[in-house]
Amino acid sequence: MARALINLPKTAKAGDVIAIKTLIAHPMETGFRPGADGRILPRNIVTEFVCRFEDEEIFRAELFPASAANPFLTFTWVATRSGRFSFTWRGDGGFDQTETASITVA
Amino acid sequence: MSTRSGRNAVDRRRVLAGAAGATLAVALRPATAATLPRTETTESAIRRFAGDNPIRPGRVTLDLPPLVENGNTVPLAVSVESPMTPEDHVRRIGVFNEKNPQPNVVTVHLRPGAGRAQVSTRIRLADTQRITAIAEMSDGTYWSASADAIVTLAACLEG
Amino acid sequence: MPRRSGMSPPAALLAILLSGALAEAEPIAPADRRSGFDQMSPAIQAMQRDDEANPGLLAVADGAELWTARPPSGRPACSGCHGEAASSLRGVAARYPAWDARTERPIDLQDRVNACRREHQGVEPLAYESPDLLALTAFVAVQSRGLPIAPPDDDRLTPARRQGRALFEARQGQLGLSCAICHDDHWGRRLGAAVIPQGQPTGYPLYRLEWQGLGSLQRRLRNCLTGMRAEPFAYGAPDFVALELYLATRAAPLPVETPAVRP
């Protein structure tokens, strides 16, 4: 399990546009870089990030070797009702991790 | 040390001024992936994203530092003018590069519930180059913005 | 001039320029001390400042978890003896390197963490630059964030402090450079495209963009020594601890910034 940090407000008023910031530990090895022995290190990247609110997809990103290590992604969402977000990162080597966070909307 | 034209001309940098007041210009070239073959041209990747549709400059704002201290991690922000309503919103934003081995940087898919078309991330730049962001709107139109970044190299590296 | 092998063109030119430099390096007065933070671009400064975006905080979060993990020996976790880190460790990192009574020599923070693990937890020391050692050290250091660096005013540290200063000011390596020539005498000017910082270690362990991860002060110093075409000291070498001690004295009272972000 990679370390992931998710930041979003715990509470919001209906109609507020909130910022969601996500950060996950991952080397994002490009597949273009030689290792110490001179041979190219195999690609190992996160290829997809999906955020859902109560099972409805609200944001998706396709990542490539050009994404920096420890991928950082921020996006926005209009607060409508209380509920749970899920954040899923998938990538090479079967990488598949989901984190969740809740929000209370007045 | 050759002189290079256009936006690469800023490779020359002043090194320390010695006691005699002499200045020296040194062309310091970061290790570049320019010698690596590209998997695909930028043009081709953009065509795959936008099809045959015309891409107009405008409505997109791309924030990239003009001078990059280290190409490994470069903050990038994209925003698109859009009310983000079900009738009028940004569907996708594709970001493309010119000099990395692969032309895609990131592609995001948005929903009207985002409220704003505003995303940020961190990217890798193999060399001084132009980055282009293209937004696909819900009405099927495509809009773009580009930004140039000069990539320098930190001193005293690992090996 | 004849081309010497192993030297890159900018470094060779630097050597010519500096062959006439002052023999006596003048250390930086406390009022003039500046963190490398000041010389970074706004974008990277923002990356460090934002606790919701600083990539070094991934390791700090790992350290927080290690802090409460019971070791396989059955002895207490760090929190078992130290309790809440935010209160018990506040100010600790700012006072390192310190004098270790048990070994009768100076000790830096990462060696202190390992000493605790060995003596009080009955576990093997963590390897230098291992993710766990970096995470724990970063977690301890972040509890002093914002506090002024203040190495102990302990006479027993004086010989090591002097040795550290001597290392800082000695010419070494193929280029005949010393740390002081760049970082005391020419900070603020440029070497290639990079601005020369004073070299104040205010934010270690830090996230170096070049490493794409967290690393220790010793790792950075090894990069410096390699850049100078000098032989890097081994991790944990007494020379390193002496140098770290001098650097801490030289940095006081700049505030701790761990986890810093640097190019």
Image: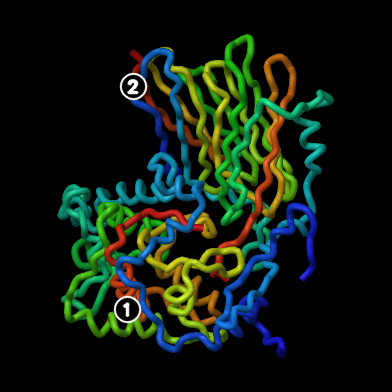
List x then y, in percent, for residue C260: 40, 55
Answer left or right for C244 relative to A52.
left
Element assignment for label 2: strand
Q: Do labels 1 and 2 share a chain?
A: no
Answer left or right for B146 relative to C245.
right
The residue labelled by disc 2 is A11
Give whichever of B146, C87 is nearer the camera.
B146
Say which mark, if any, is on residue C28.
none
Total label count? 2
What is the residue that sits farthest to the top in this orientation? B87
List x then y, in percent, for residue C233: 44, 79
Query: Looking at the picture, does residue A10 appear above or below residue C119?
Result: above
Chain under disc 2 = A
The residue labelled by disc 1 is C242
Query: Looking at the picture, does residue C229 appear above or below residue C123?
Result: below
What is the residue that sits farthest to the right in this orientation? B52
List x then y, in percent, for residue C82: 17, 54
Element assignment for label 1: helix
Is the residue under label 2 in contact with that under label 1 (CB below 8 Å)? no
Q: Quadrant of residue A15?
A: top left
